[in-house]
Amino acid sequence: MDIKSEIIAQFTQVAQEQDKRLSPLTNDLPLHDSGLDSLCFAVVVARLESSLGIDPFSEDENALFPVTFGEFTKFYENAAAK
C-alpha cells in the first residue's frame, strides 16, 4: 500500500465529509493552511491507524506533530519502515 496515496485519500475524504476546502497537498504546505481543523486531523489520524495499522504518535511519546504535509507523510513512512 502506498502510504502517501492513503494519506491524500484520507485528507480528501475528511475534507469532503466536514465541508472543508482542502488546499493542494504539496510537500511544503503548512498543515495549518491545509483547510483542515484539529478535529479533522484527529479523524485523519484515527482512519490512518485503521487503514495502515500504524499510529506514529502513540509509538513515540516525544514525537512532535509534523508542520508540513511532507513532514506528515514522512512521519508515517518512517513509522511504517520500523
Image (spheres, rainbow, N blue to C red):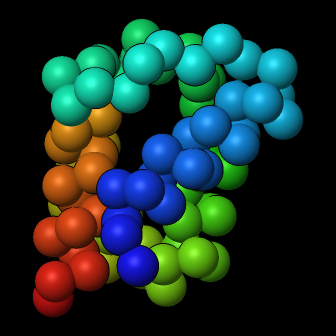
Q: Report whether 30 appears left or right of 20.
A: left
For the point 71% across and 43% down, which residue is it? 13
Query: Considering the image in quadrants, where does the C terminus appear?
Result: bottom left
Along the line of sight, the residue nearer the viewer: 72 or 7: 7
Q: Report whether 32 appears left or right of 27.
A: right
- Give the total of numbered labels: 0
Q: Report whether 24 appears left or right of 35.
A: left
Is the residue 81 above or below the residue 10 in the image?
below
| Image quadrant in which you'd find residue 55 | bottom left
| Image quadrant in which you'd find residue 77 | bottom left
Provide residue 65's location: percent of width, then percent of height. 29, 43
Is the residue 22 above or below the residue 80 in the image?
above
Answer yes or no: is residue 61 visible: no
Is the residue 4 above or below the residue 77 in the image?
above
Provide residue 38's location: percent of width, then percent of height. 59, 31
Provide residue 24's location: percent of width, then percent of height. 42, 19
Q: Report whether 22 appears left or right of 34.
A: right
Answer yes or no: is residue 33 visible: yes
For the point 66% across and 13% down, which residue is it? 21
For the point 41% across and 79% down, which residue is it? 1
Along the line of sight, the residue nearer the viewer: 67 or 9: 9
